[in-house]
Image (cartoon, helix red, strand yellow):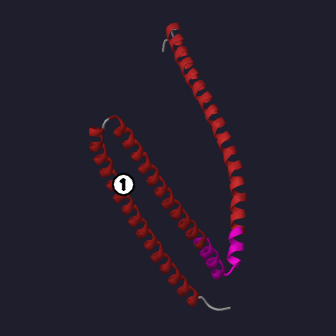
């Protein structure tokens, strides 16, 4: 085994390259461990906050479970009735707005027709026919909207009836205390 200076230098360079690779790998591991440490700390903080929230929710569930089921159903029933009343009011408001919009549009069409008639009497008839056709189309759309509203009202009524019958059956099945 002959040891030459060149072989020693090449071995030294190889060892130096390996040492640099190991050093960069160690730096990378240090950075990754620091990032993991930050994530774990954040998870611990979130876990502590989540545990408190879960404890509060469990306490609320225990409080609610103490109430009798028919009390919960009656509360839900009142909420449903309030929502139904609000729905009816919104439907009435929608119908009023549609009527007002139709009135405004008809007046606008009449004024536009009068303006066009004032300048050219022969051109007013085609515009009048177009406006009449559009009025008929709008009226048919309004009728369809009213029909859809009636269908929705009937669906709500059927749903309410089914809900009340189910609620009555549940009340009959519930043991009396």
Work out whether residue 54 or residue 100 is closer to the camera in this orientation and state it: 100
Please tell me whether residue 69 belongs to the stretch shown in magenta: yes
Snapshot quadrant of residue 34: top right
Residue 30: x, y in percent? 64, 32
**Relative to 71, is 142 above or below?**
above
Work out whether residue 68 or residue 23 is closer to the camera in this orientation and state it: 68
Element carrying mark 1: helix
**Relative to 115, is 132 above or below?**
below
Q: Which residue lies furthest to the bottom in this view?
A: 176
Quarter containing the C terminus: bottom right
Snapshot quadrant of residue 84: bottom right
Does the magenta stretch mainly form a helix, a strand or a loop? helix
Please tell me whether residue 92 belongs to the stretch shown in magenta: no
The residue labelled by disc 1 is 138
Residue at 36% from the left image edge and 58% from the top image edge: 139
The crowd level at tag 1 (other Cα within 10 Å; few <14, some 14-19, many 20+) is few
Residue 115: x, y in percent? 39, 39
Residue at 44% from the left image edge and 54% from the top image edge: 102
Q: In this view, does 57 lie to the left or right of 133?
A: right
Q: Is residue 80 left or right of residue 102?
A: right
Residue 147: x, y in percent? 38, 66
Q: Which residues are drawn in magenta?
A: 60-80
Q: In this view, does 165 lie to the left or right of 143?
A: right
Q: In this view, does 110 lie to the left or right of 120?
A: right
Work out whether residue 46 or residue 172 is closer to the camera in this orientation and state it: 172
**Relative to 139, is 76 above or below?**
below
Residue 92: x, y in percent? 52, 64
Work out whether residue 171 or residue 1 is closer to the camera in this orientation and state it: 171
């Amino acid at each position: 085994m002959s040891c030459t200076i060149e072989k020693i230098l090449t071995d030294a360079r190889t060892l130096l390259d390996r040492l640099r690779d190991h050093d960069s790998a160690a730096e990378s591991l240090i950075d990754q461990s620091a990032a993991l440490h930050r994530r774990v700390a954040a998870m611990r903080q979130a876990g502590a906050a989540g545990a408190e929230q879960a404890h509060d929710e469990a306490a609320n569930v225990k409080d609610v479970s103490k109430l009798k089921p028919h009390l919960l159903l009656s509360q839900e029933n009142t909420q449903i009735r309030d929502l139904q009343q609000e729905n009816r009011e919104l439907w009435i408001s929608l119908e009023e707005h549609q009527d007002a919009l139709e009135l405004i549009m008809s007046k606008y069409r009449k004024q536009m027709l009068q303006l066009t008639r004032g300048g050219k009497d022969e051109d007013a008839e085609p515009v009048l026919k177009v406006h009449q056709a559009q009025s008929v189309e709008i009226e048919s759309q309004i009728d369809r909207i009213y029909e859809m509203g009636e269908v929705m009202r009937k669906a709500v009524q059927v749903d309410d009836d089914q809900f009340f019958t189910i609620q009555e059956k549940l009340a009959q099945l519930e043991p009396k205390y």
